[in-house]
Amino acid sequence: MDSPYENLEERAFWRTGVAAQHPLTIRNLYRKKFDIAPDMPVVTAGSCFAQHIARFMRARGFTVIDKEPPPGAMTPDTAARFGYGLFSARYGNIYTTRQLLQIAREAFGELAIDDPEALIWQREGRYFDAMRPGVEPEGLESAEELFAHRAQHLDAVREAFREARLFVFTFGLTEYWEDTRFGLAYPTAPGTIAGRYNADHHHFRNAEAGEVLDEFLAFKQLIEAHNPDIKFLLTVSPVPLTATASDAHVLAATTYSKSVLRAVAGTLEQRFDNVDYFPSYEMVASPFARGMFYEPNLRAVNPGGVAAVMRLFFAEHPGSGPAEGEDATGRTDALDPADDEDDAVCEEILLDAFAPR
Amino acid sequence: MMSLFRKKRLRLCLFGDSHLAALKRHWLDIASPDRPVDLTFIAGVRDTLTMIEARAGCLHPRDRVVAGQFNSQLDGADRLDTRQFDGFVLIGLGLRFQTALATALTFAVHGAGEGRRLVSAAAMRAAMRDYLQHAAAVSIAETLRGATDRPIFVLPQAMPSERFAKRAAYRALDGNAIETAYREAFAAIAALLDPFGVEILAQDPETRTENGMTRDIYSAGSVRMIGDLDVPHEARDHTHMNPDYGAVQLRQILDAASAARAIS
């Protein structure tokens, strides 16, 4: 009797598809569902790991939208410190689907956040946008200025979401903090960058798979209503949680979070022709990589890991950038151990400051 | 000022790029042995004068270009002994306002301009600092301060002339936007130079128009000094000033140097 496994390719079997492969040379881990042409307008969003994707795609000649470019005199490092150039608009890291849905609803006028209590966190007399507290490291001078900046930002987000033909989203976390007075989710806990934690109305949430799926479906439906031709490329960040408020051990909490996100991404990829999944998580976090792509803190992804992930991506979507053998930035020393600084801008890592010493 | 001159001759050393020519031309036009002031000019194009190092109170050239400049401008000396001067002046040397004005065309801080992209004051300051930190004046001020504790005065470039503001691309800038851009760039310059204990001399308000640019009367007829030749700048040049502007600068410098000497 024939077995349904009899004629499968070697990539379908662990021994030939994984154990016999090397992470730096594997090529068939990802097969594209659709083409991404260099002139296809791309929006990127997500957790810190998504910043690498945007940067590498730009360097490879893809048309990554930037609706909020920095003043031309700024260096890239300063621009990143102010949240410029990291994504297609200055929304900072969008760690959860709840945040993603929230900003899309706000941009398209389905949600108005006009209560200063909901939007403004303060620190030392300066005003911070609670939805993206990291993009102005020194805060703003007044609530009025903050609302003006937010209105401009939402215009940029709306334009980006309308013009994109590809939405690249990196799922990051399931854990978040909500202000129950307003039903709003924040990217960081109040009191981390600015604002004050108040147990009466700031509540911890850890989303279940059904919630994450529903939120992304709602987001997808909303975007498609304004942009019917859009496609989605989903990834899951391989970066573990810096800290958990779930009462579980942080390792178990990370496994829960990543499992939920991976399951949702897989569900979406299976369910929709215009949704593809790119396995950056598997490339870095699975036993296949033997931990080689993590920094010594076992959390940050090293430059070699980022390069390996992007090499896998560019093998299917070559873009129009550097030739084979170079990385997307044109460097050939992507695995140089001296280049060991993770240059992504992450608010979440600030939680480490609260860890016992 | 006259009491200063009766005390003893004031010896100043001026470093600059092409923007030094306004003052130098004026000085050569008026200089006489009776004047109680000695000015020594060290001019170099673009960043060439950054190739100096401080050792034992002297500035030494770090390359042949500066060695040649020292040789020709210091009567054959191979180093500049800072103890021979009462103060130092840095003119131009990359401290310019055009980038701030170009940024102001697209960006504005809250309340400074409608229809342009909002940027926070902190981001604008950081952008100006990013741009200006590479100015030769910053490097030279640092090296100079390593060699001497005598006063160092800094005169950034003048604001571009009125003609510049009339160009189509810049007509959108009103006086408020221009003044804001000037202040932001000036604040960035001050922050960059503050560690070196210099005094920055702002452009004399009398030389500026109501909308903040430099009056055309101070830019018409500007020259580039190449050896013994005065080569007029092209008519469309809007950043270099003429000897009349140099006269204003000289007055500012002498007033500041006089005040500094009175205090010391």
Image: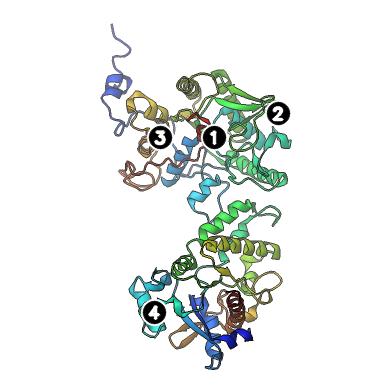
**Element on which disc 4 rests:** helix
Along the polypeptide, which appears first: circle 1 or circle 2? 2
Task: Name the residue: 34% across, 23% down.
Answer: A287
Along the polypeptide, which appears first: circle 3 or circle 1? 1
Viewer-closest of A309 and B86: B86
Task: Name the residue: 47% across, 81% down.
Answer: B41
| Cα distance between the residues tagged 1 and 2 | 31 Å
The answer to which quarter of the image holds residue A179 is top right
Residue type indicated by callout 1:
Ile
Judge depth for marks 2 and 4 and give the one in front: 4
**Element on which disc 2 rests:** loop
| Count of numbered circles on the image | 4
Judge depth for marks 3 and 4 and give the one in front: 4
Residue type indicated by callout 4:
Phe
- Label 1: how many residues lie within 10 Å, few (<14), some (14-19) or many (20+)? many
The answer to which quarter of the image holds residue B79 is bottom left
| Cα distance between the residues tagged 4 and 1 | 65 Å
- Label 3: how many residues lie within 10 Å, few (<14), some (14-19) or many (20+)? many
Task: Name the residue: 30% across, 24% down.
Answer: A18
Residue that numbered label 3 is attached to: A301
Q: Position of residue B49 (x, y in %)?
A: 42, 72
Residue type indicated by callout 2:
Phe
Q: Please report contact status of discs 1 and 2: CB closer than 8 Å, yes or no.
A: no
Residue type indicated by callout 3:
Val
Along the polypeptide, which appears first: circle 2 or circle 3? 2
Locate residue B236 relative to residue A56 in the image: left or right.
right
| Cα distance between the residues tagged 3 and 4 | 52 Å
Locate residue A337 relative to residue B106 in the image: left or right.
left
- Label 4: how many residues lie within 10 Å, few (<14), some (14-19) or many (20+)? many
Q: Position of residue A350 (x, y in %)?
A: 52, 35
The coloring applied to the image is: rainbow
Residue that numbered label 2 is attached to: A182
